[in-house]
Amino acid sequence: MRVSRLALTDFRNYRTADVAFEPGANLLVGRNGQGKTNMVESMVWIATGSSHRVPTDVALIRAGEQRAVVRCTVTNDERSFQLDVQLNAKGANRAVANGTGVRIRDLPRYLQAVLFSPEDLQLVRADPAGRRRFLDELAVMRAPRLAGVHADLDRVLRQRNSLLKSARASRLRPDELTTLEVWDGRLVELGIEVRRTRQALVAELAPHVAEAYRLVAGDEHRAEIALVTNVPETPEAFHALLQQRQRDELDRGVSLVGPHRDDLELQLNDLLARHYASHGESWSFALALRLGSAQLLRDGLGGDPVMILDDVFAELDAGRRQRLAEAAGGFEQVLITAAVEEDVPEALRHHRIRIDAGEVVEGDAPQAATADPESDPVADPVPEAAGDGRG
């Protein structure tokens, strides 16, 4: 799988840009703050339906504009898909695949991409939320229908927490909360599905992460991952636990049991990485998580995801740079961003694209024709498929 063309209109600091990418390594190079990460961020948005940098899409729209358009041509097994996304400052976003309106949450069916960025250091060091998101995004890339499961779970938790907070404020007794049973039933149903999906995913991912850590770090440290969850394996046990914790939940006004409390535990030589790993070991573990994910997708899809390395090499020593280049170089397409070209091993400098102040100024291959914002197929209203609640 590879991205052969990317066109942007009013995305971040780009008024318009239209770039052709090649198979193999593509290096986006330019000074810091020029728009290299913005360009790859647009691809990540199409692959996941959200930004890896900001929680809302308004920040992705160029200042003073009401919409941004991302057009992406994906080639997979000699078949090409034209993906068009319109991000709106007001109202729902819209997506089109080969001229047909699709739900935002279905975009991962067409483009799978694995991103490693400096923010990934927080996968190792920060709280569990980022690690849950890492697992769930990977699960959705493998089975896009799970996006709907996670959206339903989020809705159930919002409603359930709202009810618990109201009950705490009104000092209601547990036997006065008949509505809570309805949300408990949905939490049990969805929670067990999410637990089973995450558990199976971690079991498949673990050996890939261990091998990727060995390749990147160049040593024999044991990198292990495990799912930590309070979700029971059976509906009966889950219902019983909810009853057991109901008083605590009413006192605190929040759901205390469920997959929203899961964590992906990362261990290095039997020690928790977030507490004991050095800076270099943390970087290696974060890289191993992404490289392991790419290998898992490769095995499941029968083809390669697009590998994106955003401003990674500047943080690595010479040995890790070379080993990462060797590990990533085997993928069908790799996109790299760098402020200093010499930070990137020569093997990954196949096709250079220079970025300056939101413009593609030169490259090793001809730049594609400049995009005409008036001709974008998503400029005219495209109805979202029924039931899509994502913006």
Image: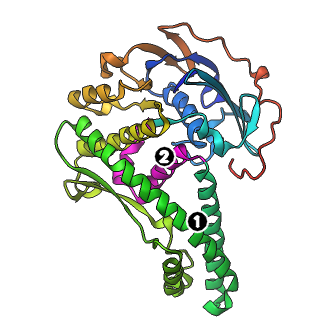
User: Which residue occupies 62% across, 75% down?
Assistant: 185
In the image, taking residue 106 as reference, residue 135 lies left or right, namely left
In the image, taking residue 373 as reference, residue 309 lies left or right, namely left
Which residue is at the front of the view, 79 or 358?
Answer: 79
N-term-proximal mark, 2 vs 1 = 2
Mark 2 crowd level (few <14, some 14–19, many ≥20, 10 Å Cα): many
User: Which residue occupies 43% across, 22% down?
Assistant: 31
Residue under label 1, please give it: 190
User: Which residue occupies 50% across, 49% down?
Assistant: 139
Highlighted magenta segment, given as a residue range: 115-144
Determine the secondary structure under disc 2.
helix
Q: Does residue 6 show up?
A: no
User: Which residue occupies 42% across, 38% down?
Assistant: 299
In the image, taking residue 286 as reference, residue 46 lies left or right, namely right
Image position, residue 124 (x, y; %): 34, 51
In the image, taking residue 251 as reference, residue 87 lies left or right, namely right
Residue under label 2, please give it: 138
